[in-house]
Image (spheres, coloured by chain):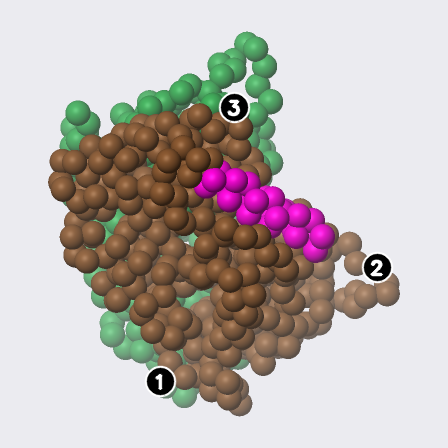
Chain colours: A brown, B green
Amino acid sequence: MSILADLKTPCLLLDEGKMRANQDRMMQRVKSRSCNLRPHLKTLKSISAARYVLGGTDSPITVSTLKEAQEFGRAGFKDILYAVAITPQKLDQVVALRREGIDLKLLIESEEMADAIANKSNETGEIIPAFIEIDVDGHRAGIAIDQTDRLIDIAQRLEQGGSLHGVLAHAGGSYALSDEKLICEAALNEATKTVKMANVLRAAGFDCRHVSVGSTPTALADIDVEGVTEIRAGVYLFFDLVQAGVGVCRQENIAISVLTTVNGWNDQKKQIFVDAGWMALSRDRGTANQATDQYFGLVCDIDGNIMPDLVVVETSQEHGIITTRPGFGQDIQAETPHLPIGTQLRILPNHACATATQHETYHVLNAEGQLAQAWTRFRGW
Amino acid sequence: MSILADLKTPCLLLDEGKMRANQDRMMQRVKSRSCNLRPHLKTLKSISAARYVLGGTDSPITVSTLKEAQEFGRAGFKDILYAVAITPQKLDQVVALRREGIDLKLLIESEEMADAIANKSNETGEIIPAFIEIDVDGHRAGIAIDQTDRLIDIAQRLEQGGSLHGVLAHAGGSYALSDEKLICEAALNEATKTVKMANVLRAAGFDCRHVSVGSTPTALADIDVEGVTEIRAGVYLFFDLVQAGVGVCRQENIAISVLTTVNGWNDQKKQIFVDAGWMALSRDRGTANQATDQYFGLVCDIDGNIMPDLVVVETSQEHGIITTRPGFGQDIQAETPHLPIGTQLRILPNHACATATQHETYHVLNAEGQLAQAWTRFRGW
């Protein structure tokens, strides 16, 4: 009988050995680029998981909420970048966290927030440091590469009270790629444009010490651009089907999965029903536009062995429907296997961040395949 | 200054007056059908919200997890239907909950689970009652209308130790409709087929007292089929953009929204950035295939007034991008308004259940538009 038989389903499994290997791989790559790593812990949202994988509390980290800044900061991770554009309403909490001894840095991409941070710094005497975001690929936000006057203006406004910490970019466009050469180009583009904008600031007299870039695909690219000081990435800690589709990991590297139990069978439609719906898997369909659509997740047996081409084709809140991937021909396993009610399966997630957040706890499998411990996740803002 | 100005964003707002009106409307409809209402509380997941809207603790309820059964049962809601096919592994917890005094009923749709429930009942002396699920529209699971022999076989197996409580159907196919006449037909189909299967069981000598049907669209349909004893529905408590697209509510009836703050503006693309991404809104795209695609949600001003055709077109974990609905012509507001950083907005959700579950708390607005209280949600399984 599997050691997982006693777990209530659905629940979230975390293979600590796979996460460790993913972290080792990233550390090796970052070292070869002579940069620091600032992992994005929005993926983990767990003090225990962060302490395990970062081996201590002195790693710089990235967060996506002030709640994460507070939780990880109070747990000892003092060097924190909040990598979402700040709002005026959040600045008082930023000051309060900094006064707790958490060295919280912000991200800005507007004149208004440069002014607001300068004013808040002057008003409170707490000099708030910030990165200016550079838009390298039109993915979301930031100062475009041709807006050098605007960049300098924002830096000047910030330094009226706050402190320019550096420039930062996120090559989010890389998630849509699946070709190693193109990912390399995206990484080169991200790094060279961000370094260039740092140099624009330096030429204008600013002390722009930090150049921060990253996304999981570009962080893992085999490039080395002088001037980049730190790499940010998050989902690499777990990896997921989207990243496997991008080609930066294999499905076997995915460290989390959702344990579920078969609770029905439709003999007309040859469908397996399981007790993991979107509440356990999330509604993320990140692989929908990739070469291989994994629907709501790829099915493994209870030991984690992938069952080729068996996917969760549909979900409702607490129901999942599993079939062989639609559209398959005769050459590939055409019929969905009839699994007995009570059979436990594991589902690999499309998007690790989205699936993990549906759960309160990581059930941690150690290298011996034993259930070692339960790591609590937090959430909220 | 709005009373919402002090709330940290993103967060979840609940208009208790709208929820009350939605409940009153459903109660009126159910009374006109001479049925009982068994609200599905998977939408609320909050003791306080349930007590407010059900006005006491004696309402029968429906749940989607044993955690909900435990939480609501211990809060006084004793008559509970767990409306997801049970697994063998969960039966011990069912027995434990029943021994706490919670009258928990199960749903079955297989011979295996009929046997397992009978065996567990005999083994423990706790006679477990169950509904048999009928498949009325091929939506998901259940005994097909032509499988009358199978239906009788399952009932016989169940009664070897357990207890047949009734038959149940869920016209989930109704969510894909948007025409009042077709919804009425779906409701008639659901009710007549389920009553027919109850009569098959009665003719075979079973005491099939309860006939339970429902989905929000079919529950609200203006029909009356003799023999239906109870109606189940959940999302009607909040309503959402999917239900508005189906036509069973107006957008103004939607009782929950996500409060968010503008944190950026892309002048090239005319995009508003806000601090609500999929973590706050969910990844649900339930309106994608409706006549009007609401993308990740429809935007309102801070007072809840809908800003026509302004939608959240894209989300990442903590970022939302708002523009005028893509593809709009000259006749409709073509340009996205440039809103100042710090502006608060409300986002109406595609799917209320999916959005609400991303939050720990309902910030409750009372009839005077005052922030009355905070109601805690629970989650997990």
Do we see residue A91 in this rendering? yes
Q: Which mark is residue A329?
A: 2
CB within 8 Å, label 2 to label 1: no
| Residue B340 included in the magenta stretch of the image | no
Q: CA distance from mark 1 to mark 3?
A: 70 Å
Q: Is residue A297 above or below residue B330?
A: below
A53 horizontally vs B294: left or right: left
Where is residue B315 shown, x and y percent of the image? 48, 41
Secondary structure under the numbered disc 1 in the rendered image: loop
* Front residue of this view, candidates A151 and A53: A151
Residue at which label 1 appears: B125
Q: CA distance from mark 2 to mark 1?
A: 51 Å
Where is residue A230 shown, x and y percent of the image? 45, 56
Q: Is residue B283 above or below residue B306?
A: below
Q: Amino acid at mark 3?
A: Gln
Query: Residue placed at 44% from the left, 83% from the top?
Result: A371
CB within 8 Å, label 1 to label 3: no
The furthest residue to the right: A331
| Residue A198 included in the magenta stretch of the image | yes
* Front residue of this view, candidates A284 and B251: A284
Q: Which mark is residue B268?
A: 3
